[in-house]
Amino acid sequence: MVATSIVGSLLHISPYRHLSTSTLGAVMGWRQCRTDEGLTHDEKRLIAEPLMAPLQLPLAARNREEMLEQYPSLGGIAGPFSRHIDECLTALGVFSEFARDIAPYVTDLDVLTEKRADSALTRVLELACRRRVFSLAIPQSLGGTGLSMLALSVGLEHLSQTCVGIANLVATHGLALAFIGATGQARLLRSIAARIVAGERSGRAYLLATAATEPSAGSDLEDFAALGRANIESHADACAGGYRLHGRKIYVSNGSIASAFVVVMPTDRARPRETLCAFLAHTPSPEITVVRTESKLGQRASPAAEILFDGHYVASDYRLNGDSIAGRTLDLVLGSSRSVVGAFGAGVAHGLLHTAVGVAMHSLGSAQLVQQPRAQAIIARLWMNATTARQTYLAAANVQHRSGLISLMETESLRVLDRLVPRRLSQGTLMDRLLGSEFIDHEAQRLLNGLPQRGIDAASAFGAAAKVQCSELALANCDLALELLGPVATREDSGIPKYLRDARLLSIYEGTNEICTLCIEQTTRGRTRWS
Amino acid sequence: MVVNGELQELLANSVRRFVEHHRSEFDALQCADGPAIPGILGNAVREAGTLGWLGALTESNAAEEAADDESFTRLLATLVHGLGRACPAFALRLLTHHYARACVLGAPPAEHPLALDPSRNEWLGAEATLSDSRCAPTLRLAQLDHGTRLSGGVRFVVGGDVAPLWLIRARGVEGVPSLVLLRRDAALKLDPVATLGLAGMGAVDADFAEPGTMSFEVVAAGEAVPRCLARANRSVGLAYLALMQELVEQSLSIARSHALIRRQNGTQLAQIPAVAGHLRTLERAVALLRTTTHSYDSHCNEAWTALPALIHAAQTAADGALQVLGGAGYIVGHGAERCWRDVLQLGQLFASDPW
């Protein structure tokens, strides 16, 4: 009864608003409706060709009312008339257009040989530049769109419904930016922002990546309490005017396409906890080699590479931190990045809901399936998991805004200033001199140091919880899709296996779910992990 | 239940030699495109036939009886378990063959124009959704003046790329569900089906544009269909569990050796509580499957009733293995990710929880 009611209500919630009837059969009408909306030839082929073409995903919210219908908890988080809702709408607009742009290339990136996938990736990067996806988080005064993390999370969730790999490509770039921000390198951030914006204008993406994991140290860096015993083999040797980076980093997302790396290495291998540093290394360089790009089970759109740093020189200015980044800085960064992985999980959970229902309706040759109580109960659970995942990451993003790294950029006066100060003024000589002075770095670092520890702990725990919870909900929806569709769900042309393969990585990267659980446990006991 | 131990040992040795002989083909299967697979497997397919693996396996003269024979179920399980170690997809092909064969042999006696002739060593393929009520048959039997003809197409025939005989479902006259044994035309266009796991199982789709060129017979219709399928389940159930057991054993072996070798922050991975928990889950799943296969009785429904729980345990275990491996296990070609995909795939085939 409850299940039937939830399934029925699915049709009344916003993504299905244009359906004319109140039965699940109407979903078919919805698909027809979408195919009339000026799709490209490739998009039509993608929909029409396979035996079990996945449905196109639901329409993104277009106004505040629809936004609050689809994301009811946003009302509580942001307040019904907050600028956050407008920013979420902007992000949804950009990412839903981008998702449409990339739809013809998603399958290529997922299943084709490396050479053809490379050409699809190049096209995706061009399209991302056209939509200015890589500068969405950059303040308007620096040429970006200036969207909040909450808005970006909502947008990335939407993109994940189409392809988590591409969402990860975008978010990995953001992770490196967060690293630079969390070390208080305001001047560097400004110069990187200028390169990103210029890259987008030229159609050649200036992408960032973070190189942290090593062959002998996987999750070691993320367990701060035990970091002293980590088997880290890479090291940064001090030399005249800077450092030389030595070592091999693996599973570097965006590794083969990045223009610059945030490289995490200790300056003293024997004391990684006390000397863990982050450096900014630019490519191309003869001392930076892409050893290989891994062939992954899923999320293939985001190339994971092994990178060899063979004595690459980095000037002192590109050492991002003063003291070790282990602990407070990593906590600030991971709190926000894990919250974004939560958004990926919610995206996968939603994607599975829509795709599984679509396949059940169109492809099994049995329109009665969705009328069966058991099927309805499964669909209801798919919906519940997807909705719960969305609420979870939104709550975590909200905590990031209040007490995490993002809170520094979220003060209302700063946001207003960012919008009101004309860009040409912010780039004027006086402003240049001010923003280019050491004062601005000191000020950023002062603000960072002023963040209360309690707040950082909360942001870190909420981020980790969102990552664990949402990835598990995504995996739960994988199981439910298999239960609903049976063998059909294992056919690649059903669209379900891509979600299964992609979702499996969510509980592994950005700190395994086990590491995240440890982090939550330590926080709930009120113990600061690095003390 | 008495199984001829000597025969079982002989068969196990035969499987070992077979696997050794065809190892390079099985390895090539992992990354082969659908259309290339029949060429790669050609020799193995022929040799399996000459070894007598497509027939009754026992010394029984009456093939119809052999399929109900406990000795047969044990021997088939030995065969599939041994093959599963080297090539789960090939093991699944053999399992599918015997599943289809048991269906046909369990059908009411009739004049079979396509009677299974053991001397021909012909492989059978079967529709993966044969006993799945979630999807309706896509093939129809139409009664015409000059006989019955097939229209529509078939989806997801496991082993269909190599097998000349297919056991498929069709909606009969007045919508009566039917099982149809079809001798496919060599000219029939096959569309390979890419699947999540068990790469090389030879799944294909086919549309019958010119149905008149193919001979077929209705093996069972109406109420006889579930009886045939139930008999087939009894016949190959143990082999199915043995294959699942093999896959989970592989997962455990990979995860355990990684956890013993690898250290995280100075601590052996196996000593970390979360990892130890995953290893325990794997050990439990292996124990559960071993206990079930050991006490399996094809005349008792208990193992079959427990099947969804066993599949769930196997999937949870394979998932845990991947988690223990972390990023390393997520790389294509690593045993852990292949086992994970294979377990998920096998859990949805033939013996999956029927609605």
Image: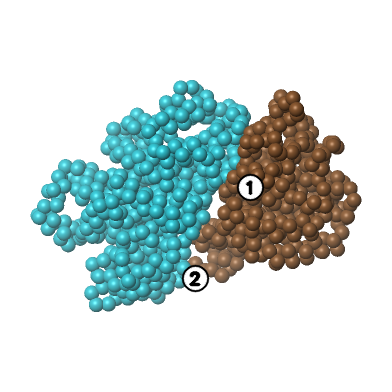
Are the residues flagged by discs 1 and 2 from a single subunit? Answer: yes
Q: Are marks 1 and 2 in contact (CB under 8 Å)?
A: no
Q: Position of residue B144 (x, y in %)?
A: 72, 26
Per the image, the residue denoted by label 1 is B203
Q: Looking at the picture, how far across and down is residue A458, in whole percent?
A: 38, 50
* Residue shown at the point (82%, 48%) measured from the top left: B117
Quadrant of the rendered image containing residue A493: top right
Secondary structure beneath dot 1 equals loop
In the foreground, A482 or B151: B151
The residue closer to the viewer here, A272 or A519, is A272
Q: Which residue is mark 2?
A: B266
Can residue B40 be seen from the camera position used here?
Answer: yes
Q: Quadrant for the C terminus of chain A, please.
A: bottom left
What's the colour of chain A in the image?
cyan
Mark 2 belongs to which amino acid? Gly
The brown chain is: B
- In the displayed structure, would residue A117 be above or below residue A24? below
Mark 1 residue type: Ala
Q: Point out residue A151 in the picture as x, y percentages from the top left corner.
A: 33, 42
Residue B28, numbered label: none
Chain letter of the residue carrying label 2: B
Q: Residues within 10 Å of mark 1 (few under 14, many from 20)?
A: many
